[in-house]
Amino acid sequence: MMTETKYTAETMKYLRLLSEKYPSKRAVTREIINLNAILNLPKGTEHFMSDLHGEFEAFRHILNNCSGVVREKVEKLYGGVLSAGEIKELCTLIYYPNEKLQMMKNSEGIDREQYSYMLEHMLEIARILSSKYTRSKVRKAMPPDYAYIIDELLHAQKDEDDNQIEYHSNILDTIISLDADDFVISLAELIKRLAVDHLHIVGDIFDRGDSADKIIDLLMKYHSIDIEWGNHDILWMGAAAGSEVCVAGAVRNCVNYNAVRTLEIGYGISLRSLTLFSERLYPYLEPMKAVLAAITVIRFKLEGQLIMRNPEFLMDDRLLLDKVDYKNFTITLDGVTYKLNTEHFPTVDPSNPYALTDDEREVIAELKAAFTGSSQLKKQIAFLYDNGGMYRVFNGNLLYHGCVPLNDDGSLKSVSLFDGTYSGKELFDIAEQKARAAFFGKDKEQSGLDFMWYLHCAESSPLCGRKTKAFERAYIADESAWYENKNPYYRYYYDKKTCEMILAEFGLDSPASHIINGHTPVQTIKGELPIRAEGRLLVIDGGFCRNYHAKTGIAGYTLIFNSHGLRLKAHKPFESLEEALRENRDIHSSSEIVETEQRRVMVFGTDNGDAIQNDIADLCTLLDFYRSGKITPKD
């Protein structure tokens, strides 16, 4: 609460503005009571996901089942009452109401009794889930067209004459006779919204899968979300800002991983000119292999130019086109000579290997114009900027995708950039500042666009943290040349003291705080565990991407943080939407308790609770002013 010595002119101005919203003692008292009540509700459930890599179907299913939270609620409510098959059927209806209803209609139809069964059970599930929120918040979460009706149904109480129950029953009968499907769909969406209060995406929406655009479309409709940028996200952000090397990198990844749908259908970016150019250069290759060969050379040429004009990036070891022996088609790295897997470099001048040909300049200029001119890409990238950042501190946890660069002794690494030296939190902050300027700046400087590539793949980048071997993977068959040295962070993040040092660097000193990390797939198949540093750090990249499944042994980790504590969820691969609908097949998920709270976490123990307590203090001051006559109330 404000003290007398702090009643400055600015404070008085603020209190008078506050009095316009709460013009009477009764209004202030009512709001204080309301806010105090909210403080004593259980905290909402937070859902953490990472490294989606364009895998839309698996992502949508995990989002729909809220990492198993919905199924757990249904089983808790109806276990022993409904059969296992009935529970699965009900869950699938909640996950995919449109598709499931249509399938049921196409099969045997849906009668009034079935609709009544669905609605009664879904209302009970919604009633249970709504119990941790204020009635006002639940009402705001409801579809506007049905808010009044759903509110009535959720709060119908049995009375001595069963009038409320009869009233409830008549409403359901009317719904079934008019538009039951729309109401079922609305209830399903309400259940999923109430199951998770806030969603965290800890980086890498883009990459190997072909539907990153569809994922972002879904995220843009989500009610409460934050995004921590990943190294693959920043690549597309740089491309949308106009970085030619980021454009080439994004195109190459799409072609290499058969994800051109994202480019052509998702963002309307045509590969026609690149394809025609590639077919002329490599007539003996299949069209898409020719495209891959051509864009790969362009990518390494542009990267080389970037490295040479930014010596402070310390990426000279990635200048490899000029190290190739173009007579024998070999390259010597660290004293070892490797044979290249191709002898065809038709656009490379050995005396000036990083120079683009006129045709290559024309191709990359057209692709750059397509990226910067795509309205859909621009809209989605703006969403990533508006709702994202390099890191997030949220309810006592620190979220970031990659790493906090460290020295060999475990201390924070100082990185020289932009005429300054940065480490720890300062490095993240300057990186975010420059990344925003690259997209929103009026005068986009080449150095800012180049920095987006640095963030994507530099060893000292907090989004990467390893010495990438893209050239070796593209041109050397011997996989021993592919090994990527990692920043010492990836050794030290098993150490509790190191993680506590990092948490303190970002202002977190509570023993209940954790680092939530993505970026590096947890190889469960080899016995790796996602819980590190005695529980202070959790890695939730378990490999959503299909290409990782053989390597990880699972199909992704997610994390749930509710009022009872933290739980990691390990997921099996998602088969298909068709199987999910036909067989009522869910993703099998196993749950591991990371930390159980001794006392249930209430809203007053969250960031939102801190803000509410500040609001209460201000309202109490306003009430004192009303009572003392320093401000005249309207009542």
Image (tube, rainbow, N blue to C red):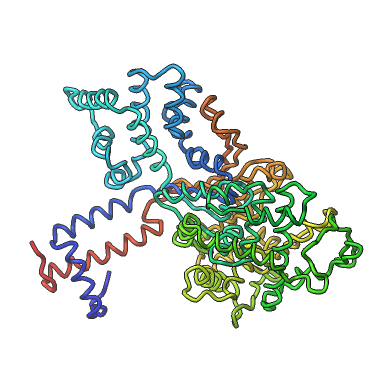
Above or below: residue 32 compared with residue 502: above
Is 318 on the left-hand or right-hand side of 60? right
- Specify the farthest residue to the bottom: 419
Q: Is residue 250 visible?
A: yes
Front residue (pair 37, 429): 429
Q: Is residue 404 visible in the rendered structure shown here?
A: no
Indicate the quadrant where residue 483 lies.
bottom right
17, above or below 249, in the image: below
| Residue 113 percent coordinates (x, y) | 34, 18
Q: Is residue 552 left or right of residue 391?
A: right
Query: In the figure, is residue 381 to the left or right of 528?
Result: left
Residue 630, how many percent across, how many down? 13, 74
Q: Position of residue 226 (x, y in %)?
A: 46, 56
Q: Which residue is painted at 59% across and 37% down in the image?
A: 590
Q: Is residue 347 left or right of residue 198?
A: right
Locate the C terminus by quadrant: bottom left
| Residue displayed at 48% across by 33% down | 71
Location of residue 408 by image quarter: bottom right
Q: Residue at x 44, y 29 (%)?
A: 93
The residue closer to the viewer here, 23 or 232, is 232
**Can you give x and y, in whole percent of width and height, for residue 147 in the image?**
27, 40
| Number of numbered discs on residues | 0
